[in-house]
Image: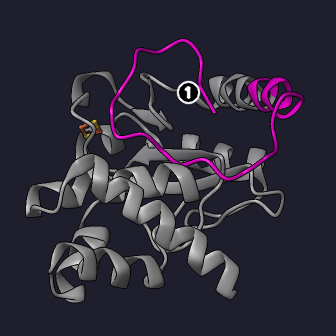
Amino acid sequence: MLVGSQQKLQDDIRALVQRHGRTRDALLPILQDLQAKHACVPDFAMQVVADELGLHPAEVYGVVSFYAFLGHEPRGRFVVRLCRTVSCELARTAPVARQLENELGIAFGETTRDGRFSLEWAACLGLCDQGPALLVNDRVYTKVTPERVHAIVEDCRRVFGAHAAQTEPAAHAAQPALAAEGGVTP
Ligand code: FES
């Protein structure tokens, strides 16, 4: 990471510490805000957060590793997560997964070259009676079929196109809160 980028990240972290405080309880909100702004929590940031909060870096790394919504590698603007827990598998997740890979041109665990989409597996989303369940950033889709996948991805592309006309395509991250079905936010 370049020195200028490190300085910027350090300044961002100090501002977040000012906002959330220096207690252990502040760790998760700080990491969530970092993820939202930088699309990941890089190793350098984990070290700075640990120093600022007086924690061991391993503790910060452990939290980043534990939560699916956090990560130390940049993700796409739209993070598509398909539940692969048993109830959804029984509701035929496999063809939905294949269609997602075909539609996006990437495998699970990958990000498209243009940085728009990351495709990931998710553990149970709490919608087991409405599977297959899919999460796109903070938006939940239920009873997803291979036929619906194209429309969902097109919806993301449409939102991306409108949003990109107004702002730089800086990386965005997934939000931890779930929202109702019916459209996605970048
Ligand atoms: S098993 Fe998929 S939402 Fe619970």
Residue appearing at x 15%, y 81% in the figure? 55
Q: Is residue 106 above or below residue 86?
A: below
- Tally of numbered discs: 1
Q: Is residue 107 above or below residue 127?
A: below
Residue appearing at x 69%, y 79% in the figure? 4
Q: Which residues are magenta?
A: 158-186
Amino acid found under the numbered disc labelled 1: Thr
Residue linked to disc 1? 145
Q: Is residue 175 magenta?
A: yes
The picture places residue 38, in percent across and down from the top left corner, at 57, 59
The picture places residue 34, in percent across and down from the top left corner, at 44, 57
Picture quadrant of ligand 1:
top left
Way the structure is coloured: one colour
Furthest residue to the right? 165
- Image quadrant where residue 130 sits: top left
Q: Nearer the viewer, residue 166 or 115?
A: 166
Q: Is residue 96 left or right of residue 30?
A: right
Q: Is residue 19 left or right of residue 117?
A: left
Our reading of the magenta stretch's main secondary structure is loop
